[in-house]
Image: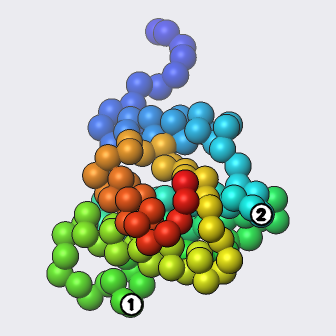
Amino acid sequence: MAYGQKILKGDAYKRAAIKRRHIRIRKRIAGTAERPRLVVTRSNRHIVAQVIDDLKGHTLASASTLDSSIRGGEADKSAQAKQVGALVAERAKAAGVEAVVFDRGGNQYAGRIAALADAAREAGLKF
């Protein structure tokens, strides 16, 4: 019997791959007071975006599909991600943030992640 890493299947494999990519990304990305980190967390149903100052360890602004302004809509998930991107950009600008470092959280830059980033750029955040 061989000893080594357990072979994962299905969703566990996907989660492990996302975690590996996120760790690899976080080696290079850190948020400062001048350019905080815009973190995107995606599940099958919801998407959450937070603007975090890593030096202080504080969340400056956040938005998600669980917010009351977005939650009741009948839009598809990509449209909801666009709304979250615009809302987090609006809240970040209200907190005095002009530019951010984008952290896609190990997810591919496509679909909902790209829609959120594009909406945040259109709302005035600089990446």
The relative height of residue 88 versus residue 117 in the rendered view (above or below) is: below
Q: Nearer the viewer, residue 56 or 97?
A: 97
* Position of residue 41 measured from the top left corner of the image (x, y, whole percent): 47, 59
* Image position of 92 (left or right of 118): right
- Residue 85: give its label: none
Q: Which residue is rendered at x = 51% and y = 79% of the image?
A: 90
Are the two marked residues, 1 and 2, in contact with CB atoms closer than 8 angstroms? no
Protein image colouring: rainbow
Tell me the kind of residue under disc 2: Ala
Badge 1 density bin: few <14, some 14–19, many ≥20, Cα 10 Å: few
* Position of residue 15 measured from the top left corner of the image (x, y, whole percent): 42, 43
Q: Write down the residue under mark 2.
A: 33
The relative height of residue 86 versus residue 57 in the rendered view (above or below) is: below
* Image position of 57 (left or right of 26): right
Which quarter shows the C terminus? Answer: bottom right
Q: Write down the residue under mark 1.
A: 68
Secondary element at tag 2: loop
Q: Which residue is rendered at x = 81% and y = 59% of the image?
A: 55
Q: Which residue is rendered at x = 61% and y = 83% of the image?
A: 94
Tell me the kind of residue under disc 1: Ser
* Image position of 85 (left or right of 33): left
**What is the quadrant of residue 50 in the picture?**
bottom right
Badge 2 density bin: few <14, some 14–19, many ≥20, Cα 10 Å: some
* Position of residue 16 measured from the top left corner of the image (x, y, whole percent): 47, 38
Judge depth for marks 1 and 2 and give the one in front.
2
Q: Which residue is rendered at x = 36% and y = 53% of the image?
A: 114
Q: Which of 114 and 34 is in front in this view?
A: 34
3D distance between C-alphas at marks 1 and 2: 29 Å
Q: Going from the N terminus, do you reach mark 1 or mark 2 first?
A: 2
